[in-house]
C-alpha cells in the first residue's frame, strides 16, 4: 500500500508550510513560553482559518472533518515550524465533545480558532491551561469542564508547553465520553507533530554542517557526520509511512506504533542535532533549542515509548 499524499493534500500541506514560514514562529514560541499569548493567538486564528482544526470537527459544527490523513499532514507542518499551544489537545477535546449535547456549544469555536482547548492528563496536569478557554478534565464518572481558574504555571522541559493543574470541580458535560477514540486522535496528532519536529531538526543540522568548516572543508563532508545524519534520516523516513498508515486505519496498535516510531525518530534526530551543532546547540537563545526541547516532550506526551510498545505487543499489528 502506498501512503503518498495526492495533489490536493500536497497543496494543502504546501500552503500551510508557506503560511507558517512567513509567520516567524520561533519568536511566537518564545513569547508563548513567557506567558505572552497575543501573537500565538493571532497565529492560531490563521491556522484555524486554513482549516486545520476543522479537520477534527464534523461539518454540522462548522468543521470539515473528520479527516485524519489531512490532519496528520497539517500536524507535520505544525511540528516542523514549532508552533506553540495545545494543538493535539484541541483535537482531543473536539473528539471528546463530538456527538454530545454540548458539542454545538463548543465545537464551532474550536473549529474557527476562537477557542483553545486543553485536556488534563492523568494526574490533573494540562498543557497551556492558562491560555485555553475550554479546559476539560476526564474522570471515571464523566467529562468535566473545569470552570475554576487553573493552578500556577509549571514550566516543563519544553518552555512552550506550559503545564497547569486543573481544578477538580466543574460542570459535568457528558457521562459517556469516548476516551479511547479521543486518545487515538490525540496520539496520532502528537506522532505527526513529532515527525515534523524531527524533519526540521534534520534540515537545520544539514544546513549547519554544510556551512561550518574544519581543516578547510565543510564538517558535513566527514564520513562520521554523514553516518549520523543518514541514521536520523532513515529513522524519520521509516516513521513517515507508519504515521500516515495509522491515519488511514485509525487502528490503536498502528497509531501506537506510529507514535513510538515518530517520537523515537525525532528524539534520535535531536540528539544528533545537538551533537553536531556543538556547544551552541545547548544555548536557549539559539532557535534550535525550540525543536530540541519539543522533541523530548512529545516523545512522552500522550503515550510514553513503553506504553506504546506494550500496546503494539499486546494487540499486534
Image (tube, rainbow, N blue to C red):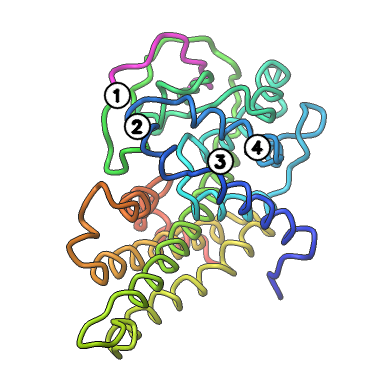
Q: Secondary structure at mark 1?
A: loop
Residue under the point 79% across and 64% down: 7
Q: Nearer the viewer, residue 90 or 184?
A: 90
Residue 221 drawn above or below residue 62: below
Q: Is residue 146 visible?
A: yes
- The x, y position of residue 5, in whole percent, is 72, 65
Give the Cα separation between the discs numbered 3 and 4. Answer: 20 Å
**Closer to the observer: label 3 or label 1?**
1
Question: Contact (CB < 8 A) between labels 3 and 1?
Answer: no
Q: Looking at the rendered structure, which numbered label has been put on residue 153?
A: 1
Residue 260 drawn above or below residue 24: below
Q: Quickly name the residue at label 4.
A: 53
Residue under the point 41% across and 24% down: 129
Q: Quickly name the residue at label 3.
A: 180
Q: Secondary structure at mark 4?
A: helix
Q: Residues within 10 Å of mark 3 (few under 14, many from 20)?
A: few
Question: Contact (CB < 8 A) between labels 2 and 1?
Answer: yes
Q: Looking at the rendered structure, which numbered label has been put on residue 162?
A: 2
Q: Is residue 140 visible?
A: no
Q: Secondary structure at mark 2?
A: loop
Magenta part of the protein: which range?
A: 141-152
Amino acid at each position: 500500500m502506498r501512503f503518498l499524499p495526492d495533489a490536493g493534500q500536497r497543496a494543502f500541506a504546501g500552503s500551510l508550510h508557506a503560511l507558517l514560514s512567513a509567520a516567524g514562529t520561533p519568536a511566537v514560541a518564545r513569547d508563548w513560553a513567557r506567558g505572552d499569548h497575543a501573537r500565538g493567538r493571532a497565529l492560531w486564528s490563521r491556522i484555524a482559518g486554513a482549516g486545520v482544526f476543522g479537520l477534527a470537527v464534523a461539518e454540522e459544527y462548522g468543521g470539515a472533518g473528520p479527516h485524519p490523513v489531512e490532519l496528520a499532514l497539517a500536524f507535520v507542518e505544525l511540528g516542523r515550524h514549532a508552533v506553540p499551544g495545545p494543538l493535539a489537545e484541541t483535537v482531543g477535546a473536539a473528539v471528546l465533545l463530538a456527538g454530545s449535547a454540548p458539542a454545538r456549544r463548543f465545537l464551532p469555536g474550536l473549529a474557527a480558532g476562537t477557542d483553545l482547548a486543553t485536556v488534563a492528563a492523568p494526574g490533573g496536569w494540562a498543557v497551556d491551561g492558562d491560555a485555553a478557554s475550554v479546559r476539560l478534565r476526564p474522570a471515571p464518572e464523566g467529562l468535566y469542564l473545569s470552570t475554576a481558574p487553573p493552578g500556577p504555571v509549571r514550566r516543563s522541559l519544553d518552555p512552550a508547553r506550559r503545564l497547569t493543574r486543573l481544578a477538580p470541580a466543574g460542570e459535568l458535560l457528558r457521562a459517556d465520553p469516548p476516551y479511547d477514540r479521543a486518545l487515538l486522535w490525540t496520539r496520532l496528532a502528537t506522532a505527526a507533530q513529532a515527525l515534523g519536529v524531527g524533519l526540521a531538526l534534520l534540515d537545520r543540522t544539514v544546513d549547519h554542517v554544510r556551512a561550518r568548516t574544519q581543516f578547510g572543508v565543510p564538517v558535513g563532508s566527514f564520513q562520521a557526520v554523514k553516518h549520523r545524519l543518514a541514521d536520523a534520516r532513515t529513522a524519520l523516513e521509516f516513521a513517515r509511512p507508519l504515521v500516515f498508515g495509522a491515519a488511514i486505519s485509525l487502528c490503536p496498535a498502528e497509531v501506537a506504533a506510529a507514535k513510538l516510531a515518530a517520537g523515537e525518530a525525532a528524539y534520535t534526530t535531536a540528539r544528533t542535532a545537538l551533537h553536531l551543532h556543538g556547544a551552541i546547540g545547548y544555548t536557549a537563545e539559539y532557535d534550535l533549542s525550540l525543536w530540541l526541547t519539543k522533541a523530548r516532550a512529545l516523545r512522552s506526551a500522550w503515550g510514553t515509548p513503553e506504553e506504546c510498545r506494550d500496546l503494539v505487543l499486546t494487540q499486534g499489528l
